[in-house]
Image (cartoon, rainbow, N blue to C red):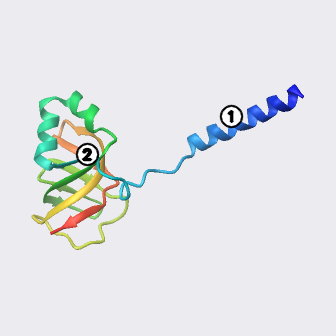
Amino acid sequence: MRKWVFLIFIFIVGVSIYQYVYQDHRNIKLEKAKYILTATEISNSSLKNLSTSEEKFLNNTLEILGYITELSEYNLTIEDLVFCSFEGSLETKIQINSKLKIKGRVIGYDDLLEQVRLDQCPIIINN
């Protein structure tokens, strides 16, 4: 009897570990943004106190509003302050200097370029 209880326990632990390790990826497009900011606001927050800013924003979903200053097939930069990367190529017709609101997960701050970095970004509003 103890042998069966032990085997069932091991099975349950194994299934739990498997589900934890192989859980689904986050869907940023469906997540509600924890903060809604402009590119200047999040950049200033990072410049003032990087450790506090990282505690607050790192791995959270944000909506950022601003103007596109750089654009390529898989990423864009908002006001030279926020770098946004996409999972695929940009399908929408957007241009430099157009205003947009974008959602993304904060993955860190690039000290060299002085930019906040976002990934898994969908475009929310394109004006």
- What residue does disc 2 label? 117
Residue ID at (36%, 53%): 31
Looking at the image, residue 70 sits to the left or right of residue 122; the answer is left
Q: CA distance from mark 2 to mark 1?
A: 37 Å
Which residue is the extreme one toward the bottom? Answer: 93
The secondary structure type at the circle numbered 2 is strand
Q: Quadrant of residue 20?
A: top right
Which three-letter amino acid code belongs to the residue tagged 1?
Val
- What residue does disc 1 label? 13
Residue ID at (14%, 36%): 45
Q: Are marks 2 and 1 in contact (CB under 8 Å)?
A: no
Which three-letter amino acid code belongs to the residue tagged 2?
Arg
Q: Which mark is drawn over residue 82?
A: none
Vertical arrangement, residue 92 with respect to residue 34, above or below: below
Q: Quadrant of residue 48?
A: top left
The quadrant of the rendering that contains the C terminus is: bottom left
